[in-house]
Amino acid sequence: MELGENTTKNIAMQESVDARAEIGTLCNPSAYGSNPDLPGFTFNNLDEHWRNHKKQYRGLTIEQYAQRAHDLVRSATSDNILGYKAKNGSIARYNKTTHDFVQGFDIGIATMFPLKGGEARFNKKRQRAEGCK
């Protein structure tokens, strides 16, 4: 029996919801689920990235910037939060409302910055990171 288009879409949607319900671990972070064990910035990395990006986050303190990045990298994907797991093991999240892009590893957050080009640019980054053409 062949599945109808709506049934196929419903199955794909359920698989996506199931992946978001997954909870990643430090050793095996989730591409789409939450990752409560991922650490924040290291002190030196935070200082460097704050110097590079503080003009883009006017009104935030360094502590607020660090917390915003940490909250986002640990988030499960949703309608507003997009994400992937790269071949190098990093986790990326993109907030469609704030345009924040964050990338983290098991040793800490690598960066957070406002992603120019929005969702289209995020999708290009995802394709490169996942090894797709």
Image (cartoon, rainbow, N blue to C red):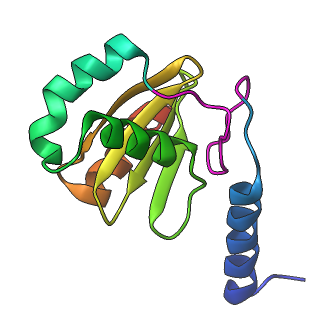
**Quarter of the figure that contains the C terminus:** top left
- For the question of whether residue 36 can be seen, the reply is yes
Question: In the current view of this chain or complex, which residue is farthest to the right?
Answer: 1
Task: Give how far across and how far down residue 35 sits, in percent.
Answer: 65, 41
Q: At 47% across and 56% down in the image, what residue appears?
A: 82
> Which residue: 72% across, 56% down?
19
**Which quadrant is home to the N terminus?**
bottom right
The extreme left residue here reads 55
Residue range highlighted in magenta: 26-40
Would residue 119 be counted in the magenta stretch?
A: no
Asked if residue 133 shows in the view, the reply is no
Q: State the residue at coordinates (73%, 39%).
A: 24
Q: How many marks?
A: 0
Rendered position, 47 above or below 74? above
Q: In this picture, is 84 found above or below 14?
A: above
Tell me: 14 left or right of 100.
right
Q: Position of residue 45 (x, y in %)?
A: 34, 16
Q: Position of residue 30 (x, y in %)?
A: 67, 41
Taking the image as shown, residue 4 lies to the left or right of residue 107, namely: right
**Could you tell me residue 49's position as x and y percent?**
25, 24
Who's the residue at 39% across and 34% down the image? 128
Asked which quadrant contains residue 15, the reply is bottom right
